[in-house]
Amino acid sequence: MNLNSFLLMRHEIVLVAVALILLIAEIFTSPQNKGRIRGLAIILFAINTIIGFFPATTGTLFGGMYSTLPIHVIVKNILNIGTLIVIIQSNTWLKNEENKNKFAEFYIVLISTLVGMFYMISAGDFLMFYLGLELATIPLAALTAYDTTRNQSAEAGIKLILSSAFSSGIMLYGISMIYGMYGNIYFDLLNPAIAMNSLTVLAFVFFFVGMAFKISLVPFHLWAADVYEGSPVNVTSYLSVISKGAAVFILTVILFKVFPTISDLWQKVVWVIAVLTMTIGNLFAIRQQNLKRFLAFSSISQAGFLLLGIIGGNEMGMTSIVYYMLVYIFSNLGAFGVISAISNVSGKENMDDYNGLYHTNPKLSLTMMLALFSLAGIPPVAGFFGKFFLFTAAAQKGFYILVLIATINTIISLYYYLLIVKAMFINKSESPIPYFKSDSMTRLGLAICIAGIVITGFASGLWEMITKVAFGM
Amino acid sequence: MGFLSLLVLIPTITIIAILFTKGKEQARLVAAIGTGIQLVLAGILVWMYLSERSAGNTAQMLFTTDFVWFANLNIHYFIGVDGISVAMIALTAVVLFAGIFASWEVEFLNREFFISLILLSTGVFGFFISLDLFTMFLFYEVAVIPMYLLIGIWGTGPKEYSAMKLTLMLMGGSALLLVGLLGIYMNSAPAGQPLTFNLLEIAKVTIPIEAQRLFFPLTFVGFGVLGALFPFHTWSPDGHASAPTAVSMLHAGVLMKLGGYGCFRVAMYLMPEAAHEMAWIFIILTTISVVYGAFGAIVQKDLKYINAYSSVSHCGLVLFALLMMNQTAMDGAIIQMISHGLMTALFFALIGMIYGRTHTRNIYEMGGLMKVIPFLSVVYVIAGLASLGLPGLSGFVAEMTVFVGAFQHADTFHRVVTIIVTTSIVITAVYILRVVGILLLGPIKDEHFTHLTDAKWYERLSTVALVLMIAAIGLAPLWLSNMIQHSLVPVIQKLSIVTGI
């Protein structure tokens, strides 16, 4: 092992460097120049995202605890892009008076959760996985409680930390059973060793339930809505997109790598959970008035769709999950970007407040419509391609009934996405949200999302690239 | 890119051009120019197709372009046309062009209106040229979704309810369809060979019968929802009644044909065994569609509802004829699609014009319109006569061919349903003549109506264009049926192996 081998951890190292630079800058900036840190954070993070795309070496470190494969690099880059959008979008909100003295913390905490996710993604054994997971979760609780002046935000923080501590406990219990039985925790060594017996099944169930809590799959989703509603909009978007994406990815990897021998079992579990998650997430979303809560439930049902890729259980499944993650980042962040822009200006977050929005703010409404159509999977925007490939992955294994249930669920989801479109375009309002000109950063964030939504679908090159590396799994 | 891609490209460019227009005048002018170019293109396409065929080119699909899109899934952008698609494209271009002029006076958000309308037509054109199931499905959905905004924003009556009902039911159909298409894809090649979405390639293999039994009903019903197959037709009356004029025209005239077209091009062509096995179920359903739709039209008071139910009846006849699975009946089905497309577009255009003058669609509040707006009234009568199948107009050719074809089956079941379906001619006559009597003849009910003005130039333009087409098919159906016949051969061949006809 030499210094060069640390380059395998380039993504993580650059991120830590960014966090440290921001921390030092925070100390040495005079109070009246504090605002510059926001600009610095965006620039540094953009550089970090670009560095991520440099050609990467692959290999393992620490005796297999940590590994870098091309697919990891791609997923990390996708998450980098998503986080960059979140950071750009949160710029306006951080300008607020109440956040004046603490926005450096926001960036540092945000980046450290991302570092945690990166370690989790690259994990080669359960220990590294668990470390990464905790590093990703605990600072998140601080982020959700970032609005110290609001009770709801504090409540969200405490709910998140309690439920994630609880789920971590359950998951660790499952991992310890595996260790007890097979004597090691390395994915590669466990792969041939895992056999079908009742203790393994119990271990798997504990592990899966723990992960289901993190991804907020039904019936372990009850914390999600409150936490999403209580947190600041930008943190909600981070929670529902980036952190969910990373968790789904690692769940897929572990199911494929560690538990292939009991795939008959977990396919049944995933089947049932997928149906429940899609359907219940959708049915609850219909009744929501608060848009953050609404998107929370919609993102629960989106996680259900991702399970269709998992159940495919092959390269196609892996590719479609990573691809959908990319599509989902652009679509959901687009929707959240509009909500946050409006909430920053007017403080309004309810569906009724959006009545007649098209007549006062046509561009924002169109962006919102594109994002919602992409979430619903309507062509020609990217969401259609993402959903189609997920369905193809599940159909490849012959789960036609599951695909049928999923397609029917997309229709249910289309219904409630159309409700927002209806509010913006069709409903009339006495007092619509007046016209406002959003600042350049908000517009930049939304522009990236729109470009992503429009281009990702048509650019088949992206899909091919992911496929190529997914086959290397 | 190839000539055919222009059919999708031109509307897309038109949409972008409309985005940059300022004011009502410019937007509608650009829309008219764009759709005008599209109409010319369609004309050139018909001419190119006919000259290619007369030069002896017997390939199943002409002007094909193949462009690999998602290589490892074998998804291609694969387009090409045969006689049927050419005819449908020509129909779409005519109806779209007429539709733009029928909505010349749209005031509210008129740029957005034309954009949505042309986006819808992009989907339709794309659907008719696609030979790859993925591309086809993509365009199918593109054609459906603008309907929500078109009805929701510019519609009348309970528009929000109708828009939501229509969108969700049609998308529900596409949900079934998606599963059907994936099922076809997974069985599209013998084990070990790459799967494909290519329609012509899949037609060469025989999909296992178990798979066909599962996926044929999904595909057929999926398309059938759009073709107003009973009992999935309920979106049609509400949707058509609430939609603005041009949208009703395009939707009833063209979009509903996507259903019938998909049924034979995908469902029956690729899965003939299951089609033969299950035909009886769908024949019964379509028989109900035809008769029930016609009876439904008798009792309606709203002009648009009358026409919407009449569309259910006529589109039911299309599916009915397809399921007869012989050359004559299927010819008739295609002619019926075109004929109904023109006729119903004309109807909806006229209803829009009459409504724009009288501000009511209730036939009992109007009367004697023949005396005040003779031009529109006469055209209405012509449309009505075409609908009830008067010789010399397109409806007669279509229905005659369908019934002759259907009667070629000698068994009791087919005989009985054919006789039942034939009664719809009489019922159609009843509701058409009833409307003509109440609406156009008799005394003028409301004295405000005496001041109504007759059709303006653009209204005359759009209606006369449609009437000419209807008469052309009625008087000289041969060129149309020649164009179609050749193209139906591959489908008939595959079916005839199974049915033994």
Image (cartoon, grey):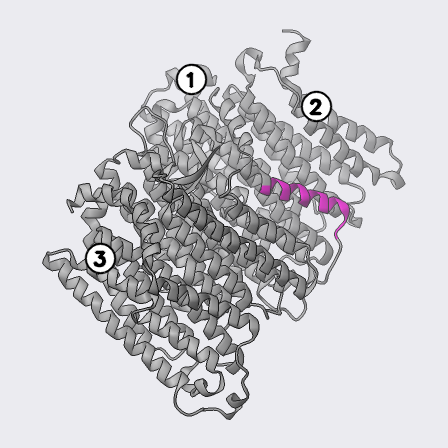
Q: Chain of mark 1?
A: A
Instruction: Give yes or no for residue B307 being in the magenta stretch.
Output: no
**Mark 2 on the same chain as mark 3:** no
| Residue B252 falls in image quadrant | bottom left
Instruction: Give yes or no for residue A452 being in the magenta stretch.
Output: yes
Mark 2 or mark 1, which has the lower sequence index? 2
Of circles 2 and 1, the one toward us is 2
Q: Residue at x 62, y 29 (%)?
A: A77
A17 displayed left or right of B47 = right
**Mark 3 on the same chain as mark 1:** no
Q: Chain of mark 2?
A: A
Q: Residues within 10 Å of mark 2 (few under 14, many from 20)?
A: many
**Kind of residue at disc 3:** Ile
Residue B283: numbered disc? 3
Which range of residues does the magenta coloring cover?
A: A438-454
Counting from the top left corner in percent of width and height, residue A370 is at 58, 50
Q: Residues within 10 Å of mark 1 (few under 14, many from 20)?
A: some
Q: Label the magenta part by its dominant secondary structure.
A: helix
Q: Residue at x 45, y 56 (%)?
A: B92
Provide the residue designation for mark 1. A190
**Kind of residue at disc 1:** Leu
Of circles 2 and 3, the one toward us is 3
Q: Residue at x 47, y 79 (%)?
A: B375
Residue B177: numbered disc? none
Of circles 3 and 1, the one toward us is 3
Provide the residue designation for mark 2. A14
Q: Nearer the viewer, residue A388 or A298?
A: A388
Label 3 vs label 1: CA separation?
A: 58 Å
Counting from the top left corner in percent of width and height, residue A181 is at 39, 18
